[in-house]
Image (spheres, rainbow, N blue to C red):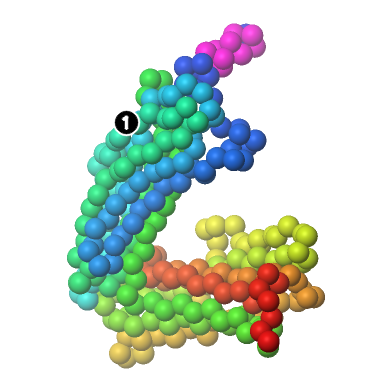
Amino acid sequence: MSRLRALAGLVVLALTGTLLTPSAAAAAAPLRVSITCDPATGVVTTAATGNLLAPGTPTAVVVEFQRRGGTRVTATTSTTLAPLPQPFTVKATTTSSGDITATGYTGAFDPAATLYYREQLVVTFRNATSGVTYATREATCDQDRRTTVTLTCDPAAGTVTAAFSGVDGRAGSANGAGRPARLGYHTARTVQQRKSDPSFRTEQFWPYWNVERALTQAADGTWTDPGYVFTPSYTNPYLYAEEVTVGIYDAYGAVVGWGTAKCTLIDGSVPAAA
């Protein structure tokens, strides 16, 4: 039985192509998918590109672009974007180096009337003959006209200060959908102790936030969160950089705001000012 299973595995590999190994991927462009929500035109575009398989015979691949969900908030409504009834399917062929490029679906939203727009994308890559799944990737676009996220690195004080605020908090549906009610933030810190050392990035595993707390709006719909002040404890690192991602939720748990910011506190590659 074990011999039959081994032979069956060899047949599948021969039919579907060989999945990329870490060593083969080292010099290849990583497989990425993207979704872009243009704030000026309201056009939504999706695409996929990068290395899918190890170098070898070009392989026919079916690429499935699926809208997983999303949110749109206007002055008077909050709408949940439903998944597409069927994925948008594209047929593509890998190059001899195993790379693939595919263009997915397009969409649109009204940028003038939209205060917040979020669309989530999942892309699945399958062998066109056998249907075997090679890989799945996800991406999200956010266009937020309400939320402000700032991160300030002060080398003299040795501190990193984050501040979060918002406007138009009364926008959305009359039942409270679309109105900011809760905030979560996620930090990622990159440290390199010496020039000859590798750098390390530390962060919470997604989808967990470092901190979550309720928001209180003023009568005019503005809100301010205290953010945080952080003083790194590393002694004279060569590099210290920080990034923060902020998610805003309404009372029903829908994402209705999003923002990111980053700054570098210490960078040994930059000469000190005279």
Q: The disc labelled 1 sits on which kind of residue?
A: Lys
Q: Which residue is drawn at 46% across and 41% down?
A: 50
Q: Residues within 10 Å of mark 1 (few under 14, many from 20)?
A: some
In this rendering, position of residue 108 left or right of residue 20: left
Pick the front one: 25 or 217: 25
Q: Which residue is drawn at 42% across and 36% down?
A: 100
Highlighted range, magenta: 2-11
Please provide percent x and percent y for residue 215. Answer: 44, 80
Residue 168 in which image quadrant:
bottom left
Question: In the rendered image, which quarter contains the N terminus?
Answer: top right
In this rendering, position of residue 175 left or right of residue 244: left
Q: Is residue 168 visible?
A: yes
In this rendering, position of residue 89 left or right of residue 201: left
Please provide percent x and percent y for residue 110. Answer: 19, 65
Residue 187 in which image quadrant:
bottom right
Let me know if residue 5 is in the magenta part. yes
